[in-house]
Image (cartoon, grey):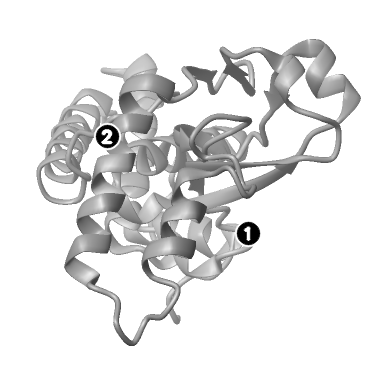
């Protein structure tokens, strides 16, 4: 069968890896769904292919200003930054330092000194950092709220706030996620460990013909596979540590 592109195909693939239908896999269908959810959660937290860096555009409402926080979609797992808000050196009007410098110094780009322009922009950026600064932000995935510590009177209904963030890739939308090699191996190992966990309850029980259950061996083997895959994803497939709130 081709690479899985849906949850149903993904589930069948994992069971075939464990021996089905030749071998009966003693795991309930709901338990399999739980292990798939666990695998996706770990994949999205640690694998660089589980999320994407993106920008969200949020238009302020009266409710936002009253609450003094923004409601963020549940698919956002971490916020990196927000674009400058409100007044200060970044104000987009004729009194803006950037605007005046561009108007007076580089009105004719054919004679402009790019090196001087870049140097001036860097100085202005330093001044903005020193005297204006960035708006402090606080975000938690469990509340889905982006708190911006600022004077909310300086913004108005209808203004936009641009949020730089990391967003989870929904496998039902981006179906190629189901075909990810590491995710397939990891979920198979989780289901196998669940199988061993179930069979451990019948350890030592003898079946007709003298066959006995050995759930502990299945569990132990699967647990080692799980640990190996988790170490592998953090060493090979995780992004470097960076500043991210969430």
Look at the image and tell me whether residue 10 can be seen: yes
Quick one: label 1, few (<14), some, or many (20+) residues within 10 Å?
A: few
Q: In which quarter of the image is the N terminus?
A: bottom left
Along the polypeptide, which appears first: circle 1 or circle 2? 2
Against 164, residue 80 (above or below) is: above
Query: What residue does disc 2 label?
Result: 126
Q: Is residue 226 left or right of residue 198?
A: left
Place residue 123 in its image quadrant. top left
Question: Residue at the spot x=19%, y=45% of the render?
Answer: 233
- Residue 227 place in picture, x, y as percent: 16, 32
Residue beneath the point at 49% across and 60% down: 10
Q: Which of 157 and 9 is in front in this view?
A: 157
Residue 35 in the figure: left or right of residue 7: left
**Circle number at residue 172:** 1
- Count neighbours of disc 2 (C-alpha within 10 A) and say few if under 14, some if 14 to 19, many if 20 or more: few
Please name whichever residue, 3 or 83, is drawn nearer the observer in this view of the structure.
83
Which residue sits at x=37%, y=64%? 105
Work out which quarter of the rendered image holds the C terminus and state it.
top left
Let me know if residue 18 appears in the view: no
Helix, strand or loop status at disc 1: loop
Q: Which of 204 and 87 is in front in this view?
A: 87
Q: Where is residue 144 in the image (x, y as percent from the top left)?
A: 64, 23
Q: Distance between the residues labelled 1 and 2?
A: 44 Å
Image quadrant where residue 206 sits? top left
Where residue 47 appears, as percent x and y from the top left, is 30, 47
């Amino acid at each position: 069968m081709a690479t899985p592109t849906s949850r149903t195909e993904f589930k069948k693939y994992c069971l075939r890896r464990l021996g089905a239908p030749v071998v009966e896999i003693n795991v309930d269908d709901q338990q399999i769904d739980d292990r798939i959810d666990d695998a996706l959660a770990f994949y999205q937290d640690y694998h660089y292919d589980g999320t994407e860096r993106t920008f969200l555009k949020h238009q302020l409402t009266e409710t936002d200003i009253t609450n003094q926080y923004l409601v963020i979609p549940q698919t956002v797992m971490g916020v990196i930054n927000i674009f400058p808000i409100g007044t200060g050196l970044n104000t987009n009007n004729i009194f803006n330092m950037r605007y005046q410098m561009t108007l007076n110094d580089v009105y004719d780009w054919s004679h402009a000194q790019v090196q001087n322009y870049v140097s001036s922009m860097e100085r202005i950026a330093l001044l903005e950092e020193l005297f204006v600064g960035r708006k402090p932000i606080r975000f938690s995935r469990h509340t889905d709220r982006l708190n911006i510590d600022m004077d909310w009177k300086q913004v108005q209904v209808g203004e936009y706030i641009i949020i730089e963030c990391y967003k989870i890739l929904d496998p039902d939308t981006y179906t190629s996620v189901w075909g990810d090699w590491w995710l397939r191996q990891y979920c198979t190992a989780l289901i196998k460990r669940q199988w061993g966990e179930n069979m451990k309850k019948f350890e030592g029980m003898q079946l007709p013909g003298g066959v006995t259950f050995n759930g502990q061996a299945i569990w132990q083997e699967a647990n080692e596979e799980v640990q190996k895959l988790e170490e592998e994803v953090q060493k090979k497939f995780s992004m470097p540590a960076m500043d991210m709130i969430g």
